[in-house]
């Protein structure tokens, strides 16, 4: 199936219907990953913004770097240390939720504490890791690189995306309700604590699956910026979700294809986030323009 699609893409490139960069397998792999990852991150991002957990996704991104360092130290392949990567990040997220449910600390304080612990562990291990591998490998983890995406990465991304889609869509309304009013959700029989664990697990695994493309430092931005852009355009949950998915997907696709076509040597993660930032600035201007117009019109009426 993969070879058939790749052959069709190459024929489209030769005919001039598709961008020339798609004839390379790694660019094709990246575009497939973008088309899968964009909608998932956009949809989950609406809940991240609603639950005010933007800082948590940043913490998971930094924990991913620590997980990579642990994997390399334990002898896993430095291009795909998935066992330690998923293992450390899931333990990180679940421990944070467990602590939150049993203490009275605010979420931002708790995330800050766990983030500092994760960074401290990573800083200690990185000194050992950088002596064993090329430091540029860690740059790929931090900022993403389409050059490193392979069949294993795509397989992991597909599996994780399917899990998130099946879990998220079936429980989306309950998650939204528990975010806005946990007490009402409990009265209606919603398992709020279970949904907290499930949502943190979803954010964790999709963040880890995104590291190869977007980078550990920047993955938070693609969870938050498209959702923030969508919030500028609509207040309905349906529109919020739809616009966030569209902005996230377009950011991934444009951020991968355009730099390759223009031969701009930038990390894929940085390019994707810059496109997302463009959408955010544009939607902010669109939202602000009616207010500016109404203010000017009101001042005009008051002038003699």
Image (cartoon, rainbow, N blue to C red):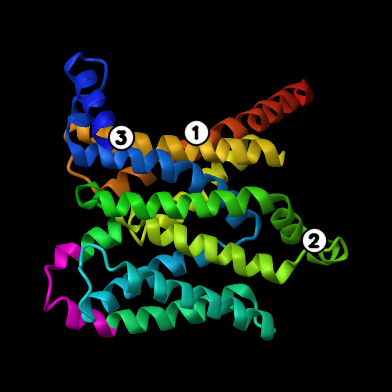
Pick the front one: 1 or 206: 1
Which comes sooner in the sequence, label 2 or label 3?
3
Instruction: Give the labeled residue for mark 3.
Output: 1
Residue 23: percent from the left, percent from the top?
A: 18, 30
Instruction: Tell which residue pokes out farthest to the front in this image.
Output: 1
Side of 15 relative to 191 (left or right): left
Instruction: Give the labeled residue for mark 2.
Output: 181
Q: Quadrant of the C terminus?
A: top right
Circle 1 or circle 2, nearest the eye = 2
Instruction: Give how far apart the Cα atoms at labels 3 and 1 are.
Output: 39 Å
Q: Quadrant of the N terminus?
A: top left
Disc 1, SS: helix
Side of 304 relative to 81 (left or right): right
Residue 140 appears in which quarter of the rendering?
A: bottom left
Prevailing secondary structure of the magenta residues: helix
Specify whether residue 85 is in view.
yes
Instruction: Give how far apart the Cα atoms at labels 2 and 3 are.
Output: 46 Å
Instruction: Tell which residue pokes out farthest to the top in this image.
Output: 15
Instruction: Give the labeled residue for mark 1.
Output: 282
Which comes sooner in the sequence, label 3 or label 1?
3
Instruction: Give how far apart the Cα atoms at labels 1 and 2 are.
Output: 32 Å
Pick the front one: 57 or 30: 30
Which residues are drawn in magenta? Answer: 124-137
Q: Residues within 10 Å of mark 2 (few under 14, many from 20)?
A: few
Disc 3, SS: loop
Rendered view: 179 above or below 121 = above
């Amino acid at each position: 199936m993969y070879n058939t699609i790749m052959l069709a893409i190459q024929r489209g490139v030769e005919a001039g219907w598709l961008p020339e960069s798609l004839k390379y397998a790694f660019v094709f792999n990246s575009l497939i990953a973008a088309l899968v990852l964009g909608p998932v991150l956009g949809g989950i991002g609406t809940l991240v913004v609603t639950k005010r957990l933007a800082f948590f996704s940043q913490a998971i991104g930094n924990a991913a770097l620590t997980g990579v360092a642990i994997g390399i130290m334990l002898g896993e392949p430095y291009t795909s240390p998935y066992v330690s990567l998923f293992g450390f990040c899931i333990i990180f997220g679940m421990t944070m939720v467990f602590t939150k449910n049993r203490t009275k600390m605010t979420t931002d304080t708790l995330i800050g504490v766990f983030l500092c612990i994760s960074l401290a562990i990573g800083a200690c291990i990185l000194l050992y890791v950088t002596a064993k591998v090329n430091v540029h490998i860690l740059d790929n983890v931090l900022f993403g690189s389409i050059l490193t995406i392979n069949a294993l990465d795509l397989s992991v991304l597909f599996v994780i995306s399917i899990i998130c889609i099946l879990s998220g869509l079936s429980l989306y309304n309950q998650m939204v309700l528990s975010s806005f009013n946990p007490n009402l959700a409990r009265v209606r029989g919603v398992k709020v604590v279970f949904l907290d664990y499930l949502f943190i697990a979803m954010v964790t695994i999709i963040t880890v699956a995104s590291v190869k493309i977007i980078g550990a430092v920047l993955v938070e931005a693609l969870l938050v910026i498209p959702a923030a852009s969508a919030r500028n355009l609509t207040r309905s949950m349906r529109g919020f979700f739809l616009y966030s998915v569209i902005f996230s997907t377009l950011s991934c696709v444009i951020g991968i294809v355009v730099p390759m076509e223009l031969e701009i040597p930038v990390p894929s993660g940085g390019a994707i986030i810059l496109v997302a930032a463009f959408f955010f600035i544009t939607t902010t201007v669109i939202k602000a323009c009616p207010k500016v117009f109404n203010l000017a019109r009101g001042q005009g009426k008051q002038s003699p």
